[in-house]
Amino acid sequence: MMPQPDPTARHVFVYGTLRCGGSNDISRFSPAPQRVGDGEIAGTLFDLDAYPGAVLGGPARIKGEIYRITPALEVQLDALEEVKPDGSGEYIRREVVVEVAGRPIACLVYEIHPARIEGRPVIASGDWMSRA
């Protein structure tokens, strides 16, 4: 019998240290996420020294990876990204649609709080893993 998909599972778009090979590689978390593919979203990527921050929207593109995650892993990611219910945390959890292999997938994405990017340089390539 084939295992049934988890109806509570969601997807997350990761663009920084949570990417494969990053300092917070999402594959090290438990329960293990399932990689769905690579994608891009509209936004600008800022260099915050040890990690990046994304501001959604606009003409620029941000490169990242899409993972299927459980609610338990989502809680861990919210804690790592310092998400606060009132929006005052380091990151704000948003939802975007990312196209993967021609299929739209609703994904969580962690957008940096606007107060954290003042004076920070833009990563023009939109790719944290290949920044120069």
Image: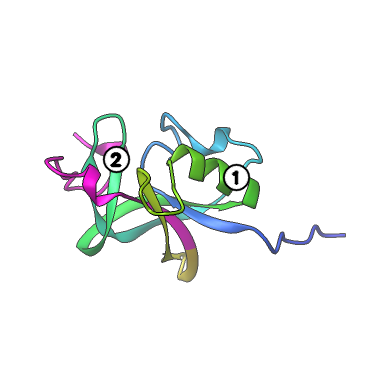
Residue 32 sits above or below residue 63 on the image: above
Query: Most extreme residue toward the left, as rendered?
Result: 119
Q: Relative to the observer, which residue lies in front, 130 or 114?
A: 114
Q: Position of residue 47 (x, y in %)?
A: 22, 38
Secondary structure, mark 1, is: helix
The quadrant of the rendering that contains the C terminus is top left
Query: Most extreme residue toward the right, as rendered?
Result: 1
**Amino acid of disc 2:** Pro
**In percent of the image, x 43 and y 41: which residue is there?**
82
The verdict on residue 116 being magenta is yes
The verdict on residue 85 being magenta is no
**Amino acid of disc 1:** Leu
**Residue 105, can we see it?**
yes
Q: Which residues are magenta?
A: 107-132
**In percent of the image, x 42 and y 29: which residue is there?**
23
**Residue beneath label 1, please?**
73
Label 2 environment density (alpha carbons within 10 Å; few <14, some 14–19, many ≥20): many
Q: Which mark is residue 52?
A: 2
**In percent of the image, x 29 and y 50: which residue is there?**
54
Label 1 environment density (alpha carbons within 10 Å; few <14, some 14–19, many ≥20): some
Residue 125 sits above or below residue 29 on the image: below
Q: Quadrant of residue 121?
A: top left
**Residue 70, can we see it?**
no
The quadrant of the rendering that contains the N terminus is bottom right
Q: Position of residue 122 (x, y in %)?
A: 16, 45
